[in-house]
């Protein structure tokens, strides 16, 4: 059983690491639409998969949530912003695709064309 | 939505949008009491009586990205269809309280579903908001107080890899009996 005592130890670990790296971390911003439309379409498992995968692989990204992105029929939507605020929009994402986005886009800087909005809406 | 925990996630977004700084969430899933549902109490911007009467209409919304709002209408529909009860009260500039109580033995009442994912999703994204979460079922109770967690973390980002993974497991463990 986990206790809050464990958390204290982890805090120290995290503090040590925080002093070492700071800048590199925010290379990407990953934003998930979490309004009624997104949630109903399955955004919660997507968000959970993204957060878990980013944490496990220590990927250089911060995962954020937003409201309705505006294309409710294409939810769940995941937007990836790079340092220059260039945006890649992934649509109809599920937990597996979310993992792939972290593996390829965040860790290797490879855009996965077939999941992007451009493939669905011309 | 096929899980009550998804509706809960949706409703909590309203409180966040209302700039609440403290959100209290009580969840019950009790066979013996024949009761399943949740209560969300926030100290956000609140609504006027007129707004409260309007939110049940799906064509009323304050958002600007689209012209419909289905969060509360979904709950109202669910309560109507299953002989349950939805209560909404609000005071402008002081906060809103929503409570949904359903009968667990009604065949049209959805399951609670993955409550751990809902709680985790809320906490991950809203570090400036305090959450007091309480879960109760027939055999156990689980309390998650984000203030307590923040005190321990002492300024360390909740999204630090090891911290966020630990929190995920901690919540999962605490809610273990949710799927019956």
Image (spheres, coloured by chain):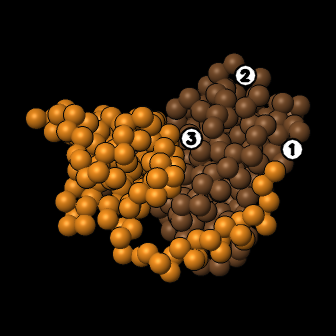
Chain colours: A orange, B brown
Mark 3: secondary structure: helix
Q: Which residue is mark 1?
A: B140
Please give the name of the residue rendered at 34% of the width and 60% of the height, measured from the top-left corner: A29
Residue A18 placed where, x, y %? 51, 76
Depth-wise, is mark 3 or mark 2 nearer the camera? 3
Which quarter of the figure is the C terminus of chain B placed in? top right
Name the residue located 53 percent from the left edge and 73 percent from the top edge: A17
Disc sitting over residue B106 in the figure: 2
Q: Are marks 1 and 3 in contact (CB under 8 Å)?
A: no
Q: Nearer the viewer, mark 2 or mark 1?
A: 1
Q: Tag on residue A117? A: none
What secondary structure is marked by label 2? loop
- Cα distance, mark 1 to mark 3? 23 Å
Q: Residues within 10 Å of mark 3 (few under 14, many from 20)?
A: many
Identified at 59% across, 46% down, the residue is B118
Disc number for residue B7: 3
Q: Nearer the viewer, residue A46 or B53?
A: A46
Please say if B166 is above or below A16.
above
Does label 1 or label 3 sit earlier along the sequence? 3
The chain to which mark 1 is attached is B
């Amino acid at each position: 059983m986990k206790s809050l005592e464990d958390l204290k130890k982890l805090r120290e670990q995290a503090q040590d690491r925080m002093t070492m790296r700071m800048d590199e971390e925010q290379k990407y911003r990953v934003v998930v639409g979490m309004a009624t439309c997104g949630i109903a379409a399955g955004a919660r498992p997507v968000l959970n998969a993204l957060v878990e995968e980013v944490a496990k692989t220590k990927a250089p990204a911060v995962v954020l949530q937003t409201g309705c992105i505006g294309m409710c029929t294409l939810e769940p939507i995941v937007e990836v912003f790079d340092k220059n605020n260039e945006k890649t929009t992934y649509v109809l994402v599920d937990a597996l695709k979310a993992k792939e986005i972290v593996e390829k886009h965040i860790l290797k800087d490879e855009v996965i064309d077939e999941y992007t909005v451009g493939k669905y809406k011309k | 939505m096929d899980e009550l925990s998804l509706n809960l996630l949706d409703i909590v977004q309203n409180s966040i949008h209302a700039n609440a700084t403290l959100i209290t969430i009580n969840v019950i899933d009790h066979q013996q009491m024949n009761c399943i549902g949740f209560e969300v109490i926030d100290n956000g911007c609140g609504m006027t009586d007129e707004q409260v009467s309007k939110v049940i209409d799906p064509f009323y919304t304050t958002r600007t990205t689209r012209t419909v709002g289905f969060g509360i209408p979904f709950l109202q529909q669910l309560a109507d269809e299953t002989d349950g009860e939805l209560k909404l009260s609000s005071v402008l500039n002081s906060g809103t309280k929503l409570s949904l109580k359903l009968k667990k033995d009604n065949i049209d009442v959805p399951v609670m579903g993955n409550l751990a994912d809902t709680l985790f999703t809320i906490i991950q994204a809203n570090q400036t908001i305090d959450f007091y979460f309480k879960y109760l079922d027939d055999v156990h109770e689980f309390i998650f107080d984000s203030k307590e967690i923040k005190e321990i973390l002492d300024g360390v980002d909740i999204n630090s890899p090891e911290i966020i993974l630990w929190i995920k497991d901690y919540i999962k463990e605490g809610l273990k009996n949710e799927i019956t």
